[in-house]
Image (tube, grey):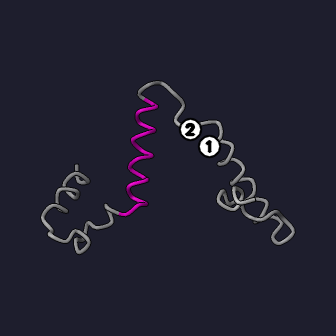
Amino acid sequence: MQSSKDCMALLAYEEPEKSPMFYLLSMDYRQSVADSLNRAILAHANLPSYTSMERLIQQTTVVRQWLHQELGKDGPPLFSLPAFLKN
């Protein structure tokens, strides 16, 4: 309920970028809302909320972070999807 009030508060400003609620317009926040909505729709349809590829990337990231912490410089570098896709 508070989020909808915060969104409505943006309408009171002629220049929303000067509003204390400007964070609601950020790309990170918008992505978070879209992800939450997608997961809710998938859950309502009794479908998995994550694809197999998302799960694999999550697991790979966690394992590589752990290895990096345990082995330090001798371990593999941290996983980065953008870096991986560039190779």
Residue 10 lies in quadrant: bottom left
Q: Which residue is mark 1?
A: 54
State the separation of the CA atoms marked 2 and 1: 6 Å
Against 5, is 18 above or below?
below
Q: At numbered mark 2, what does the secondary structure look like: helix, strand or loop?
A: loop
Q: Position of residue 85 (x, y in %)?
A: 69, 55
Q: Specify the principal SS of the magenta part.
A: helix
Q: Residue 54's x, y, as percent?
A: 62, 43
- Give the crowd class for mark 1: few <14, some 14-19, many >=20 residues within 10 Å: few
Q: Above or below — where is 39 with respect to 7?
A: above
- Extent of the magenta region: 26-43
Query: Per the image, is 34 magenta?
Result: yes
Neighbourhood count class around disc 2 (C-alpha, 10 Å): few under 14, some 14–19, many 20 upward = few
> Residue 60 location, x and y as percent?
72, 50
Q: Amino acid at mark 2?
A: Tyr
Left or right of 42 on screen, residue 70: right
* Left or right of 87 on screen, residue 30: left
Q: Badge 2 is on which residue?
A: 50
Dots 2, 1 in contact, CB < 8 A: yes
The amino acid on which the numbered mark 1 sits, given as a three-letter code, is: Glu
The quadrant the C terminus occupies is: bottom right
